[in-house]
């Protein structure tokens, strides 16, 4: 999962003439994309959120964030305008996500072999996400200048032997998932290139994503990407070493990924519990890239909720936090009282904590 400091964006807009299409500018300091508004409404994708089975919130959010952040490596936020996918319809995606069969030869999941044990053909592909990157043309036109396709793959596949029966889980090895993903990605790229509205020369970034299990407390991670500048052939994939961890960990090995960060978090937790003994729990979700910590989201639950207590506690956290967490990583700390979010402390890389209070007036 990815965590970034998201202060409020600018609401300035630019429009070419009195056209129904507007480009809304995000705050440049945030490094976010401009987005498209048509007839006064944000342009959404008709195919957004379509999946083989219901995607849990953690995976869905991590999937979208992973696609967005990797896209920035190839499609500059200063040059391109973001638009939710408009080229893959809901019907198309439903066909692609289905199993291959005599009635649906577009299905990217394998044919149902009729088995009800571990010899069954699992559904490897969970969902496909399309993001479009536009540039402004003449008049009020926006031109497709790039595209990112996220392909979410399963490591486990749940199924029932009879309608409404017991749910079983079939494991999928990492090697099998990767191999199936490569085959699926090749077919997806070829189909996109065959679409005359997309064509042969629009850069297409393909991001492969591994779903976390339904019992995981964190979302999945992207594991590879390929940038197709033209054509429908995929040559060498760029592999990613991303990992999400939950702190405090029950057991860590010295020198393993996150071991020192886990120790730092436990010391931080002990410190704030000493200041306010009524803390009921504190957990952290940490994101690693190439075994380096790149972001952390901390949740603190307390049993007190007076304004003065929350303010004093939040101030204390902002002062002691830098003792335990180096300034080169973005961190968000959410403070809850009786299940109500009352304060958020956030900082981007290299900055100090900023506190936002959420009280009813």
Image (tube, rainbow, N blue to C red):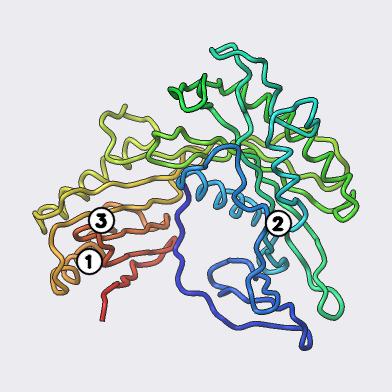
Residue found 26% across the figure and 67% down from its top: 342
Choose between 51 and 74: the one closer to the eye: 51
**Separation (CA) of disc 2 from disc 3:** 43 Å
Tag 1 residue: 314
For marks 1 and 3, the one nearer the N-term is 1
**Separation (CA) of disc 1 from disc 3:** 15 Å
Residue found 74% across the figure and 77% down from its top: 21
What SS does tag 3 mark? helix
Residue 124's disc is none
Q: Confirm or deny contact between disc 1 and disc 2 (CB under 8 A).
A: no
Residue 164: give x, y in percent of width and height: 47, 28
Residue found 58% across the figure and 40% down from its top: 222
Choose between 26 and 100: the one closer to the eye: 100
Residue 202: give x, y in percent of width and height: 84, 53
In which image quadrant can residue 334 be found? bottom left
Residue found 20% across the figure and 61% down from its top: 337
Residue 323's disc is 3
In which image quadrant can residue 153 be found? top right
What SS does tag 1 mark? helix
**Separation (CA) of disc 1 from disc 2:** 40 Å
Q: Work out whether 313 lies above or below 60.
A: below
Residue 85's disc is 2
Q: Work out whether 255 lies above or below 93.
A: above
Residue 339: give x, y in percent of width and height: 24, 57
Choose between 129 and 299: the one closer to the eye: 129
Judge depth for marks 1 and 3 and give the one in front. 1
Tell whether 6 sits left or right of 360: right
Q: Quadrant of the C terminus?
A: bottom left
């Amino acid at each position: 999962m990815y965590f970034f400091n998201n202060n409020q964006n600018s609401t300035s807009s630019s429009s070419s003439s009195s056209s129904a299409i507007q480009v809304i500018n995000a705050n440049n300091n945030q490094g976010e994309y401009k987005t498209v508004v048509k007839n006064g409404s944000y342009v959404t994708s008709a195919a957004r959120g379509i999946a083989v089975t219901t995607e849990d919130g953690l995976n869905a959010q991590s999937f979208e964030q992973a696609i967005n952040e990797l896209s920035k490596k190839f499609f500059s936020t200063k040059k391109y305008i973001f638009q939710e996918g408009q080229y893959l319809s809901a019907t198309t995606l439903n066909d692609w996500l289905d199993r291959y069969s005599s009635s649906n030869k577009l299905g990217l999941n394998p044919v149902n072999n009729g088995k009800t044990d571990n010899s069954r053909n699992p559904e490897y592909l969970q969902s496909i996400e399309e993001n479009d990157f536009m540039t402004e043309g003449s008049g009020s036109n926006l031109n497709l200048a790039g595209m990112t396709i996220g392909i979410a793959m399963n490591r486990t596949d749940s199924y029932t032997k009879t309608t409404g029966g017991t749910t079983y889980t079939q494991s999928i090895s990492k090697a099998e998932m990767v191999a199936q993903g490569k085959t699926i990605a090749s077919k997806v790229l070829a189909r996109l290139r065959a679409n005359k509205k997309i064509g042969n020369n629009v850069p297409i970034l393909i991001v492969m994503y591994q779903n976390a299990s339904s019992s995981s407390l964190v979302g999945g991670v992207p594991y590879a990407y390929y940038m197709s500048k033209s054509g429908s052939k995929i040559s060498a994939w760029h592999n990613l070493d991303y990992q999400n961890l939950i702190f405090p960990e029950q057991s860590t090995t010295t020198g393993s990924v996150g071991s020192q960060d886990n120790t730092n978090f436990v010391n931080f937790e002990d410190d704030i519990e000493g200041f306010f003994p009524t803390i009921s729990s504190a957990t952290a979700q940490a994101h690693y890239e190439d075994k380096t910590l790149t972001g952390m989201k901390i949740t603190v639950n307390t049993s007190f909720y007076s304004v003065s207590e929350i303010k004093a506690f939040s101030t204390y956290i902002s002062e002691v936090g830098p003792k335990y967490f180096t300034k080169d990583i973005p961190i968000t700390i959410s403070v809850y009282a009786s299940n109500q979010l009352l304060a958020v402390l956030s900082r981007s890389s290299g900055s100090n904590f900023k506190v936002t209070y959420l009280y009813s007036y």
